[in-house]
Amino acid sequence: MSEPNVLLAHLIQEAGMSNAGLASRVNARLGTRYDHTAVARWIRDRAVPRGRAPEAVCTVLTERIGRTVTRADIGMEKGLPRRPVPDLESVMRHTAALWHQDGREEFFLADARPERGPDVVVPAFVWENPPGDADVSGRGIRSIGETEIIQLQQARERYQEMYRRVGGLPVRRRLGAFLARHATEALNASYPDATGRRLHRTVGGLTALAGICAYDARRQALAQRYFFAALRMAKASGDRGFGAYVVALLANQAMSMGEYRLVIQYSETALRATGASLSPALVSDLCTMQARAYARIGDRLACHAQMTRSESAAGHIRTGEEPSEASYVQPGLVETQHAEALRQLGDLTAAERYAVESLAMVEQAHPRGQVHRFAGLAMVRAQAGRVDEALEPAWQMLARVRGMESGRLHDRVRSVRSALVSRSAEPGVREFAEHADAELRLPL
């Protein structure tokens, strides 16, 4: 299913009308016989009505909202592409509509599919290459400055901590509603170019986090759209390091979808575009993702080369000097990821060594990271046929996942359960499987 016309849906809500109300007002102007189902089809299927109906919709909404509404504003511009064009104004208009719908609708884009194929590299190409944005100042009525930007930065830190403690599902809609109200208000204000670049950097960080929460809620299409929007905001901000972070998020999502060549392409783009200026934590993470991707396609030499490069970069990490978004690269993360890459290659002895090493630093990791570390060791030992030894970290994983609402962590529990049950029917394994099933049966 393609993405609905969120621009039109948002403007109808802003105008305080129902679908039937819009249809009746268009009929009064044109003598047509549209009803609420026709408007629903315009939104759901991105259908464009014939004749003068799009102009009539614009007129009705202009009168109700009190500002000029164009065909582009309602997503019915002639020749409008299915994905938002990369100019900043169009992206921000579309993204604001996403925020509003995401904050209001529990199942927003639940059935939509993420883009695949050549188009998914276009946002990264646009970010990497000129031209840049000459002016990103705002021309609204109310002026904003440093105080408002700091408030938005603090909000990101709060929602990020919530995500790490309880999962992306309970955070996603709250963050969408926050962005719809506060970020939209800030972007529509008045500010000079320098403030505008910082504002887009900050709102881009919040939008990227919204994408992470959507990804954790298994809304891959919504997550991808948020990541694309955040990458466009990164270009407007002029912060190449932040852009590389967003590309790393796209690479991680591509990994989850089995697009391993795309993981490598995204990672190489981020590293090439930033050169020596990229922070060691992000260099390390991008190289680690390439190592995992090479492991998945069976390229042992390339995997080991990227592992070496990642470990070299990790040795230069200085926590206080890293950008705030890179705080997920905590001590032991590299070891956790390398254990996974080596497990995929079948090098279980080395994989276990890395997994044990990561657990030596487990208390320095946030709760989500702890789940992944114990799961990683359990998977290695199960694959080695040492199921009894795998049970202890499996139980530790299960204890830490309780209280979190996370699609990704549920998938992790399911993978560990499957690895154990497929290799043993011993009472201890059956007991673990029963407790895991009880956790997985809880609705998210």
Image (spheres, grey):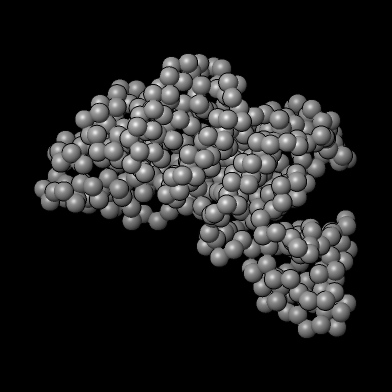
Q: Would residue 54 be found to the left or right of residue 13 on screen?
A: right
Q: Would residue 261 be found to the left or right of residue 208 on screen?
A: left
Image location of residue 283, percent across then percent down: 50, 26
- The residue nearer to you, when weighing 195 against 299, is 299
Quarter where residue 124 is shown: top right
- The residue nearer to you, when weighing 140 against 127, is 127
Quarter where residue 178 is shown: top right
Decide if residue 208 is in sight here.
yes
Image location of residue 434, percent across then percent down: 22, 52
Q: Residue at x 59, y 24 (%)?
A: 275
Residue 102, placed above or below residue 37: above
Image location of residue 229, percent across then percent down: 65, 45
Q: Would residue 208 be found to the left or right of residue 163 on screen?
A: right
Residue 269, placed above or below residue 123: above
Q: Residue at x 85, y 69 (%)?
A: 55
Quarter where residue 112 is shown: bottom right
- The residue nearer to you, when weighing 35 against 381, is 381
Image location of residue 419, percent across then percent down: 23, 47
